[in-house]
Amino acid sequence: MSQVTTRNPYNHDPLERYDLYSKADMMTALQQADDCFNRWRHTDFDERADLMHKLAGLLKKQIEPLSELMTREMGKPIKESRAEIKKCAWVCEYYAEHAEDFLKDRIISTDAHTSFIRHEPIGAVLAVMPWNYPFWQVFRFAAPALMAGNVGLLKHASNVTGCALKIAELIHQAGFDKACFQTLIIDHEQTTELIKQPKLKAVTLTGSDAAGRKIAAQAGKNLKKTVLELGGSNAFVVLADANLDNIIDTAVTARFQNTGQSCIAAKRFIVEAPIYDEFLERFQKKVEQLKYGDPLDEDTTLGPMARADLAEELADQLQRSVQQGAKILIGGEQSKTRFEPTIVTDVTVNMPLMQEETFGPVAPVFKARDKEHALNVAAATQYGLGVTVCTRDPETILKQLHRFPDGAVFINELVKSDPRLPFGGIGISGYGRELSRAGIKEFINQKTVYVKTGQRLRNDNFMV
């Protein structure tokens, strides 16, 4: 039987070996999920919320072992791992408290005596998730999906298989039926086969635009609903009136958090000419203070990249940009999974570092002639996940939101996900939304109910 092996990206030691599911195992899991859905969909919100609060409590109680597992499997600095687990607890609590309100019947005034929209779950949803935020990416799907009455199947990245199994274990420990959420250790070919099955109702994927195209094509052939949160090439725009005292630390975090391995990381720094030299000097000083080391060490602020092939891909993007005239200000060296924090200048809009998604600790800094030039360059991308604009005059940017082809605009703050706000992109950054009210409604049947005769119903909430 085929196996997957997880490895510590810092020292490259093997961690665990796991057997892949057989086709029979996978089909059994899907049948169990479908059977469970037919029970779970009839539970009330109070019961679901109680279990979700228990899940949040388990996450909080087990922060240390969960964080260590995550750090060992994908190299995230331990302090960042702890923050990720806390955020997972938050999203569980958020949907426990708000799901019922989000999904209550909505009265619509029509010619009928009564007409309303009822929100009903659709069934088994497959989540194809990446390794860079191995807990958060899953929980921001699982919390709304389970609270809506759906059931989940997880196909996680193979290098974080331990995290994937632990997530399912935590959900079961909280009291959810074991078939309500299942981790499947399957490969890409098996994933394709699973998507074909009628009992699977939808797919959500977070990953690269290349992965998104494949999953969307497979789901489309089988008429399955999809939500795709794909790559990003987020601009971090620094206008001439920006307060550098307030945004330099933000800029460093925006690029180098999680060793730069984030779809919403700042990928392109676009700085207006009058402030360019000062920004670059101060940015460089802060970047040089980053400390590479064992990610389990409390003092480490920059860990290894998750896999050597990813580091090599980033090195190739850097080298191709240098061949086109870019200059490495600091860093640039790569050995296996270690990649020095790197700042690149003299970049142009057509270079790989400005056009492709870069997943790692490399920061190209572009000098814009003026504000108009800066905003135009920020918008010159096929991606559309998010953008940061730093300025003392946010009102002017608020009047020009239409100029940014992105799912999110953050002013004087790095782009980040928040359970209270919709999250997702446009263009080759994907479609659909996660989190907030919008996220829980993605895998819901919004059923129209129209009553022509009979007494008008007076209750605004018809959930039974």
Image (cartoon, rainbow, N blue to C red):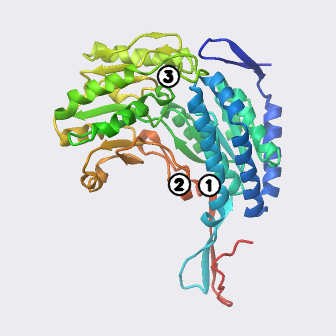
Q: Looking at the rendering, which quadrant does residue 342 occupy?
A: top left
The mark nearer the N terminus, 1 or 2, is: 1
Residue 272, horizontal then vertical, whole percent? 21, 35
Residue 100, horizontal then vertical, whole percent? 66, 64
| Mark pair 1, 2: CA separation | 8 Å
Asked if marks 1 and 3 touch (Cβ < 8 Å), the reply is no
Residue marked by disc 1: 94
On the picture, is 446 further left or further right than 249?
A: right
Residue marked by disc 2: 420
For residue 278, above or below residue 106 = above
Q: Secondary structure at mark 1?
A: helix
Q: Secondary structure at mark 2?
A: loop
Disc 3 residue type?
Leu
Q: Residues within 10 Å of mark 1 (few under 14, many from 20)?
A: many
Residue 177, horizontal then vertical, whole percent? 82, 48
Residue 266, horizontal then vertical, whole percent? 39, 34
Disc 1 residue type?
Tyr
Asked if marks 1 and 2 touch (Cβ < 8 Å), the reply is yes
Residue marked by disc 3: 302
The mark nearer the N terminus, 3 or 2, is: 3
